[in-house]
Amino acid sequence: MTAPLFLQTPGLRQFATALDIERQAQLTKWGEQQHPDGTGPDNANARELADGYRAHNDHDPTEKTWQTILLEEVYEALAESDLVKLRAELVQVAAVAAAWIRDIDTRPHPMLCAHCGEPIPVDPHSHTWHGPVPAPGQPYSAVPRYHLGVEYPECRKAGG
C-alpha cells in the first residue's frame, strides 16, 4: 500500500492533478513510449543557448520572464548527456512549469462572459455570474462564466 502524498507547496496539488490527467490522456492516445533522449553533445548549441538565457536572466531582473527562465532550464536539459543530471534538469523544467502555472492561476483574471464575451461586473454583495464547478486540477479562472443578470437572457440560457 502506498502512503498518501502530502504536497505542501501552494498550487502543487492542483498542478499534480492536472499533470496526472494529461499523462492519462497521453497514455490513452499513445500508450507507454520509449524514445532516445536526443540530448548531449549532439545538441551543440543547447549549452550555448542555456548560457545565453542564464546571462540574460542574471543581467537585468526586469527583463526576466517565465519564458526566459523556462528556456534556460530546457536548454540546460538538452545539453546534458549524463542521465542523473538530465533527470535533475528535467525536474527543474517541471518545477519552473509548475511555478509559471501557479502564477497564472493566482493572477486576477477579468471575468468575461463565455457567451457574449463582454465583461461580467463584480459585485461583492450579489452573484453576477454563473457557470460550472471546475474539474479536479482546473483553476477557477479556466471555467466558463456567464452573465446572471436579467438584462442578459441569452447569456443566462447559454450557461445552462
Image (cartoon, grey):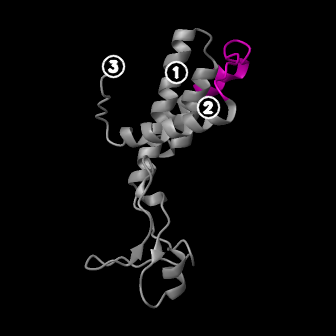
The residue tagged 1 is 89
Estimate the x, y position of residue 129 in percent, counting from the top left: 41, 75
Quadrant in the rendering for residue 115: bottom right
Question: In the rendered structure, does residue 68 fall within the stretch colored magenta?
Answer: no
Type of amino acid under label 2: Leu
Mark closer to the chain start, 3 or 1: 3
Choose mark 3 or mark 2, whichever is in front: 3
Q: Which residues are magenta?
A: 31-52
Q: CA distance from mark 3 to mark 2?
A: 23 Å
Q: Dot 1 lies on which element?
A: helix
Question: How many numbered marks appear?
Answer: 3
Q: CA distance from mark 3 to mark 1?
A: 30 Å
Q: Amino acid at mark 1?
A: Glu
| Residue 120: image location, x then y, percent | 44, 77
First in sequence, mark 1 or 2: give its number: 2
Tag 3 and tag 1, C-beta contact below 8 Å: no
Q: Is residue 154 above or below residue 14?
A: below
Q: Which mark is residue 27?
A: 2
Residue bearing the label numbered 3: 1
Of the residues shown, which amino acid type is indicated by label 3? Answer: Met
